[in-house]
Amino acid sequence: MSHLQRREKERLMREAGRLPNGQSLTEKFPVLTYGPTPKFNPATWDLRVFGAVKSERRWTWAEFLELPTQQMTVDIHCVTRWSKFDTTWEGVMFRDFLRELELTDEARFVIAHCDYGYTTNLTLEAMDDDDVMLATKYEDRWLHEPELIEHGGPLRTVVPKRYFWKSAKFLRALEFSPVDKPGFWEAGAYHNEGDPFKEERFNRRGF
Ligand SMILES: Nc1nc2c(c(=O)[nH]1)N[C@H]1C(S)=C(S)[C@@H](COP(=O)(O)O)O[C@H]1N2
Ligand SMILES: [Mo]
């Protein structure tokens, strides 16, 4: 795509309400990870759910693959100012996953815990949306394949209505919490909500 073609597509996407202010279009798929990429071992990998649930749960990789999956095509927006349109993901819709659980009345926030300690927080309301996914595949290929693993294999959240730092790669646990727990970036300079269409990039400490 030439420079002019990109400018034209950006203009059209902005008019269509799909390109937030301060973003430009990328056709690449940049990798942004703080720290190393964990090794995936299907024999020892698990996903845990803990906190404000009636009983804590654990899925092995084989058990997780039994859950019903869907595909979705969404736009993603990184706070470092790139947006990528029409990315296709496959996995378990978070809403379907919630049906596997019994939350207590206190559950208000969802904290995603990843390998090597990365965390990110959202309200249960933001997570309980029809486009939030626990994704195992990108463009029909497993995220744990060597070419894709840096993008979060074997499992990541995809939260299209938030900046992409809220989409937790190498996901290993979901904590349901009565109180908010600012994550890795949110505890620093990044905004707690991170809505790209409101340009919620930084918090007060970040100015
Ligand atoms: N576990 C983990 N998840 C993470 C990150 C990280 O460093 N570790 N970086 C976040 C940031 S800042 C972005 S922009 C996206 C990048 O996803 P990508 O590498 O697939 O583009 O992942 C998010 N999820
Ligand atoms: Mo990011």
Image (tube, rainbow, N blue to C red):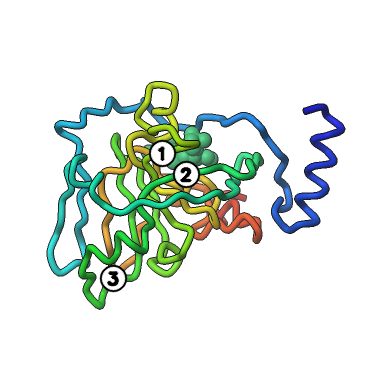
Q: Which mark is residue 107?
A: 3
Q: Please tell me how crowded label 1 is: few (under 14), some (14-19), or many (20+) other residues with Cα within 10 Å.
A: many
Q: Residue furthest top?
A: 146
Say if mark 1 contacts mark 2, CB within 8 Å: yes
State whether label 1 is within 8 Å of ligand 1.
no
Query: At x 31% / y 28%, what residue is drawn?
Result: 38
On the image, the x and y values in percent for residue 19 come to 71, 51
* Mark 3: secondary structure: loop
Disc 1 marks which residue? 137
Q: Residue furthest left?
A: 55
* Mark 1: secondary structure: strand
| Camera-nearest label, 3 or 1 | 1
Disc 2 marks which residue? 89
Mark 3 / mark 1, whichever is N-terminal: 3
Mark 1 / mark 2, whichever is N-terminal: 2
Q: Decide which of 187, 134 is in the foreground and name it.
A: 134
| Camera-nearest label, 2 or 3 | 2
Quadrant occupied by the N terminus: top right
Query: At x 81% / y 49%, what residue is drawn?
Result: 12
Q: Is residue 207 above or below residue 99?
A: above
Q: Which three-letter amino acid code belongs to the residue tagged 1?
A: Lys
On the image, the x and y values in percent for residue 138 come to 46, 37
- Say whether residue 53 is left or right of residue 8: left
Q: Is residue 33 above or below residue 66?
A: above
Q: Which three-letter amino acid code belongs to the residue tagged 3?
A: Ala
Q: Is residue 19 above or below residue 142?
A: below
State whether label 2 is within 8 Å of ligand 1.
no
Q: CA distance from mark 2 to mark 3?
A: 27 Å
Q: Quadrant of residue 56?
A: bottom left
